[in-house]
Amino acid sequence: MNDFEKLSQKADDEDVEVITYPFQSERIKGLYIDGTITLNENLSTTSEKACILAEELGHYYTASGNILDQQEEENRKQELKGRLWAFNERIGLSGIIRAYKANCQNLHEMSVFLDVTEEFLQDALDTYHSKYGIYAEIEEYIILFEPSLTVIERFNFYQD
């Protein structure tokens, strides 16, 4: 079962219907409205479909009401919450570490390894940078976001 199918199953488990629709605008990739997620039928890859579905599921789990007007600060906050849910669902700090362990050398290799689009990955990294600042620590790893993405494995020099 691929990631898109797993997310579709998650939506089904929550009684959220997932449908496709031929949106007139290519800018609209997906929408969540009242228990239904609509994906643009022109999404080209299962990776892209999974990224958009994750974001719309994020809105299902985190948003309330109509947040389409992004001029409103509260709507922007809810948009960010939904996107953060999607980033954590599809990547997370642990995904960055898995990509490091798999010797991924650049954004493209990471996106292929994590089965996400490069745009989604870059947005996730930017969001994590905004959330955590210059670095984040997880288990024995430090993830640096500045000056460029770097993962450092801490070593325990002291042994009992």
Image (cartoon, rainbow, N blue to C red):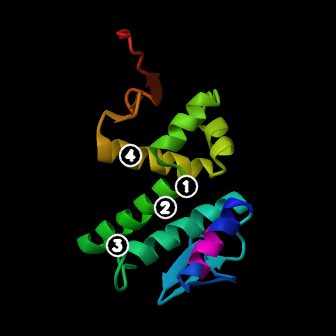
Q: Which residue is mark 3?
A: 70
Give the magenta range: 7-12
Residue 45 x, y percent position in the rendering: 74, 61
Residue 86 is marked as 2
Label 3, label 1: how far apart the Cα atoms are? 24 Å
Q: Secondary structure at mark 2?
A: helix
Give the side of residue 12 with respect to residue 89, left or right.
right
Numbered circle sitting on residue 130:
none
Badge 2, how many Cα within 10 Å: few under 14, some, many 20+?
A: many
What SS does tag 3 mark?
loop
Q: Decide which of 20, 71 is in the foreground and name it.
A: 20
Q: What is the C-alpha distance between the residues marked 3 and 2? A: 18 Å
What mark, if any, has residue 128 been given in the picture?
4
- Mark sitting earlier along the chain (4/3): 3
| Above/below status of 19 relative to 91 | below
- Contact (Cβ within 8 Å) of mark 2 with mark 1: yes
Give the alpha-carbon distance from disc 4 to disc 3, as whole Å.
Answer: 21 Å
Instruction: Please identify the quadrant where the N terminus is shown.
Output: bottom right
Q: Nearer the N terminus, badge 3 or badge 2?
A: 3
Amino acid beneath label 2: Ala
Q: Is residue 1 left or right of residue 74?
A: right
Please tell me how crowded label 4 is: few (under 14), some (14-19), or many (20+) other residues with Cα within 10 Å.
many
Q: Is residue 49 visible?
A: no
Residue 90 is marked as 1
Determine crowd level at label 1: few under 14, some 14-19, many 20+ residues with C-alpha closer than 10 A: many
Residue at the spot 38% in from the left edge and 46% down from the top edge: 128
